Image: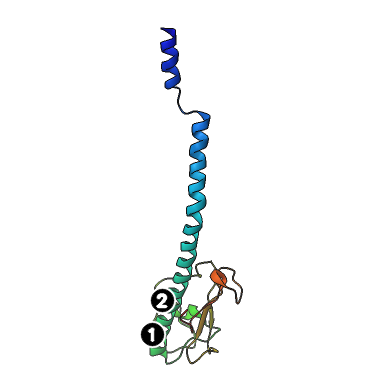
Amino acid sequence: MRNEKRRRAKSEAGVTLIEMLVVVTIIALFAAVVAPKMFGHADKARVTAARTQISNFGTALGAYKLDTSMFPTTEQGLQALRVKPSNVNQWQGPYFQQDVPLDPWSHAYIYKYPGEHGDEPDILSYGADGQPGGEGINADILSWKSN
């Protein structure tokens, strides 16, 4: 009877150390394969979000110009879409429903008018590194270029 109790106790003892190590190893391998792909998609989503936000600024700036006959100056910046600048007549805003957001990497968007790339204002994000230039996720996202 004692042997029977021991066998039953051993079989009900739970998970062995070896079994636990096998499970942890499988989870670690899975994470090593899946995590880089997930982070790659997150980076692409941030770039897409920045492009979309710059496009939204362009739409709001178009409405601003229709009402005021001009774009905000560099000094007035994108904040002119939310708060009426003191020397602007015919302002019918706010042209942007929420506060002017930061880019997906928590940096301020750069706004210049007059711009250096045509008649429209220049709006840009310096990407993940927050510095001019760069490649990949560090590349600048520019209003005057579609890619």
Residue type at the position of mark 1: Ala
1 sits to left or right of 32? left
Which numbered dot is residue 63? 1
User: Which picture quadrant has residue 127?
Assistant: bottom right
Q: Residue at x 48, y 70 (%)?
A: 47
- Hey, what amino acid is under mark 2? Phe
Vertically, is 109 above or below 122? above
Looking at the picture, the colour scheme in use is: rainbow
Position of the N terminus by quadrant: top left
Q: Horizontal and vertical percent for residue 51?
A: 45, 75
Residue 78 appears in the rendering: yes
Disc sitting over residue 134 in the figure: none
Question: Which residue in the protein does label 2 denote?
Answer: 96
Give the image location of residue 145, x and y in percent.
48, 83
Q: Position of residue 135 (x, y in %)?
A: 57, 73
Task: Tell me what residue is drawn at x 48 percent, y 92 percent.
Answer: 119
Is residue 46 depicted above or below 73 in this figure? above
Q: How many marks?
A: 2
Q: Is residue 99 visible?
A: no
Q: Position of residue 60 (x, y in %)?
A: 40, 81
19 shown above or below 8? below
Sequence-first tag of 2 and 1: 1
Q: Residues within 10 Å of mark 1 (few under 14, many from 20)?
A: some
What's the CA distance linking mark 2 and mark 1?
10 Å
Nearer the observer, 122 or 77: 122
For the residue labelled by badge 1, is the local secondary structure a helix, a strand or a loop?
helix
